[in-house]
């Protein structure tokens, strides 16, 4: 390994390790806050809390690892660019891609390790975590009783207002419902002001000592008429010992593994096997239900009867029966239809739940690959971005890293939700965030490789919206009188450009003035040419009379195309917003606010498309021929393919303008 590779790898790994530890600690604190209700006030020792969090730690890695790679890449390459170390490398003939070579190998190895981790460690940790979390409340009897809510403890349902004492064994405001043996509900209620839990580690019985309370017990008389009086017995007590058999509760092992149905607990091979079984069962149940419903209609039996009897069936069977029986048959038919409809509706919900279960398993399959690809993606976003912004440290890189990662995480969560709800395919839902950010990684890598700086601005998003409604007021005037410049007040610098223009003949100077916009000259060059022509007795009035003051046709064309580009950008933005709103509304059809917002976005799209069409037609008028496809025709015939038509129009117009002789 060369010195440069070792240096870059060492610099990156140092930053990577530091950032990973910091971010992991932050996410651990977030986990503690998330589970504070399950950990606090339950007399858990340090070892149990540590075990609880240890099982949760691996599930943090899919969020921490991509963010760490992104932030470490930006900070490392931003710092190298800020201190001109990249400039020194490039002056020595080392390109950006050569500098990335060793780190790219490391990231690929890390992505493979991330896949193995996601396929083996995370499922096992989730398996242990969920089971440990399910049993942690049963480790001690006091932990099984929560404040302010009913807790199922053995053969009793207990509610306490407050717990106190070093082990939470002092209780106050106690309400106890004794479970009924025959399943008739609770007939015995015990209320007490205070109480105390007493037990020993080896005992199978816990004693609850109650103080200052009463016991209420419903009495069920043998005579039905006496039951309407609702008699009960009330017993007051100063002290009452209640023995609860918690042998089953005390035998609960926190390591006992009961929950096994969660899809994120399975490895790739197990998921593949499970998906095969789920799909086969789903198809069998659908076919079985279809056949059962078909049989219930009686159509098959009627066909068999018709074929066996070889007789024709009347067009209206009811006419063969008296009126009294017709109503009976109609009632039976309505009852059958209602029953079948109810069965179909219930089974539909059941099938949807099964489909969601299948989708969640597919998402778990794709997640294992997404985390590996995310490592590569974040590196090829962070490294070029750091080289472009030329800023290291913990300031600007953190801002960019957080914005990019929030976008990635939000789109990933949104896509997986849609995929699970069957709004889109699970594959697209799992890979949506990667597909959206991949073009950004390619763009940044391309610009960094070719030393193209990139100004971070959101004008591309806001300018089209502003200029679409204000451009008509600020468009330049094409009246010749408005193009005359007061040369007496105009100041020019007699520089090298001035001396160059002085050597030109009159025809070349007139051409400079006329096609200044076409050749991309700055306004100062045009003013200098006008000054020189004026000194040679060729005034602006003479140029206006000859039609050489400015190229009106080309400037009209350039202005129309500039407005077309601005309006078409706004059209594309509103088109993408419309597609997004359609997907959202399809999964929230009852939300009127979302539907109204979607309609507003659609209206904005049509407004933008109309203004784009106006500019398009204006360009065709100046060119004197039809170029491209009119946007409103595209909308009417192929709304889903608007982007393709948009790209085609942009290319066609740009080519026609470059080939025009204006």
Image (tube, grey):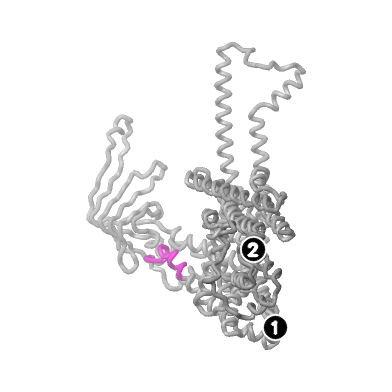
Look at the image and tell me in which quarter the C terminus lies: bottom right
Q: Residue at x 58, y 27 (%)?
A: 336
Res 30 label: none
The x, y position of residue 581, in whole percent, is 55, 50
Vertical placement of 179 versus 244: above or below? above
Res 543 label: 2
Q: Residues within 10 Å of mark 1 (few under 14, many from 20)?
A: some
Residue matched to label 1: 94
Q: Answer whether labels 2 and 1 touch (C-beta < 8 Å).
A: no
Residue 267 visible somewhere in the drawing: no
| Residue numbers of the magenta segment | 29-41
The x, y position of residue 257, in whole percent, is 54, 61
Residue 157 visible somewhere in the drawing: yes
Vertical placement of 25 versus 415: above or below? below
Magenta span: predominant SS is: helix
**Front residue of this view, candidates 598 and 625:** 625
Q: Quadrant of residue 342?
A: top right
Q: Residue at x 32, y 37 (%)?
A: 220
């Amino acid at each position: 390994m060369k010195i440069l590779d070792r240096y870059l790898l060492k610099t990156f790994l140092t930053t990577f390790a530091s950032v990973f530890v910091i971010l992991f600690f932050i996410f651990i604190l977030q986990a503690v806050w998330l589970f504070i209700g399950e950990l606090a006030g339950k007399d858990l020792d340090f070892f149990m809390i540590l075990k609880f969090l240890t099982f949760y730690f691996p599930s943090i890695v899919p969020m921490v690892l991509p963010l760490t790679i992104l932030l470490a890449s930006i900070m490392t390459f931003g710092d190298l660019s800020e201190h001109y170390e990249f400039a020194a490398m490039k002056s020595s003939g080392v390109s950006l891609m050569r500098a990335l070579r060793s780190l790219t190998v490391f990231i690929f190895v890390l992505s493979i390790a991330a896949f193995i981790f996601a396929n083996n460690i995370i499922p096992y940790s989730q398996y242990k975590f969920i089971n440990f979390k399910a049993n942690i409340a049963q480790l001690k009897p006091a932990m099984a009783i929560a404040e302010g809510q009913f807790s199922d403890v053995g053969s009793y349902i207990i509610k306490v207002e407050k717990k106190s004492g070093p082990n939470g064994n002092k209780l106050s405001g106690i309400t106890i419902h004794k479970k009924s043996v025959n399943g008739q509900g609770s007939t015995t209620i015990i209320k007490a002001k205070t109480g105390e839990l007493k037990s020993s580690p080896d005992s199978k019985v816990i004693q609850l000592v109650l103080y200052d309370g009463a016991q209420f017990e419903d009495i069920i008389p043998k005579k039905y008429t006496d039951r309407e009086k609702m008699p009960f017995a009330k017993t007051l007590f100063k002290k009452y010992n209640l023995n609860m058999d918690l042998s089953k509760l005390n035998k609960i092992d926190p390591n006992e593994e009961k929950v096994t149905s969660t899809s994120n607990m399975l490895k790739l091979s197990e998921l593949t096997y499970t998906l095969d079984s789920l799909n086969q069962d789903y198809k069998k149940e659908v076919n079985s239900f279809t056949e059962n419903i078909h049989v219930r209609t009686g159509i098959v039996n009627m066909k068999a009867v018709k074929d066996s009897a070889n007789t024709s069936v009347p067009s209206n069977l009811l006419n063969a029966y008296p009126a009294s029986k017709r109503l009976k048959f109609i009632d039976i038919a309505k009852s059958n239809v209602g029953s079948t409809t109810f069965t179909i509706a219930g089974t539909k919900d059941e099938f949807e739940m099964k489909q969601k279960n299948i989708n969640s398993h597919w998402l778990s399959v794709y997640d294992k690959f997404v985390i590996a690809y995310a490592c590569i993606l974040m590196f090829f976003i962070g490294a070029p971005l750091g080289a472009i912004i030329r800023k290291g440290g913990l300031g600007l890189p953190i801002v960019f890293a957080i914005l990019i990662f929030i976008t990635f995480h939000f789109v990933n969560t949104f896509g997986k939700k849609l995929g699970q709800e069957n709004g889109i395919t699970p594959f697209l839902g799992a890979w949506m965030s990667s597909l959206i950010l991949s073009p950004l990684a390619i763009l940044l890598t391309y610009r960094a490789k070719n030393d193209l700086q990139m100004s971070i601005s959101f004008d591309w998003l806001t300018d089209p919206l502003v200029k679409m409604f204000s451009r008509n007021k600020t468009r330049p005037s094409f009246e010749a009188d408005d193009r005359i410049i007061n040369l007496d007040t105009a100041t020019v610098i007699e520089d090298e450009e001035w001396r160059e223009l002085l050597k030109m003949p009159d025809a070349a100077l007139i051409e400079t003035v006329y096609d200044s916009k076409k050749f991309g000259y700055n306004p100062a060059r045009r003013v200098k040419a006008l000054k020189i022509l004026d000194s040679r007795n060729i005034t602006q009035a003479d140029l206006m009379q000859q039609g050489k003051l400015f190229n009106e046709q080309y400037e009209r064309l350039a202005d129309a195309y500039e407005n077309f580009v601005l309006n078409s950008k706004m059209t594309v933005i509103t088109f993408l917003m419309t597609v997004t709103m359609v997907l959202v509304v399809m999964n929230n059809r009852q939300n009127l606010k979302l539907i109204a917002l979607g309609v507003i976005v659609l209206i904005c799209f049509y407004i933008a498309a109309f203004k784009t069409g106006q500019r398009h037609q204006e360009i065709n008028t100046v060119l004197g021929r039809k170029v491209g496809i009119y946007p409103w025709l595209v909308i009417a015939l192929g709304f889903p393919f608007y982007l393709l038509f948009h790209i085609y129009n942009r290319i066609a117009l740009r080519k026609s303008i470059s080939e025009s002789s204006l």
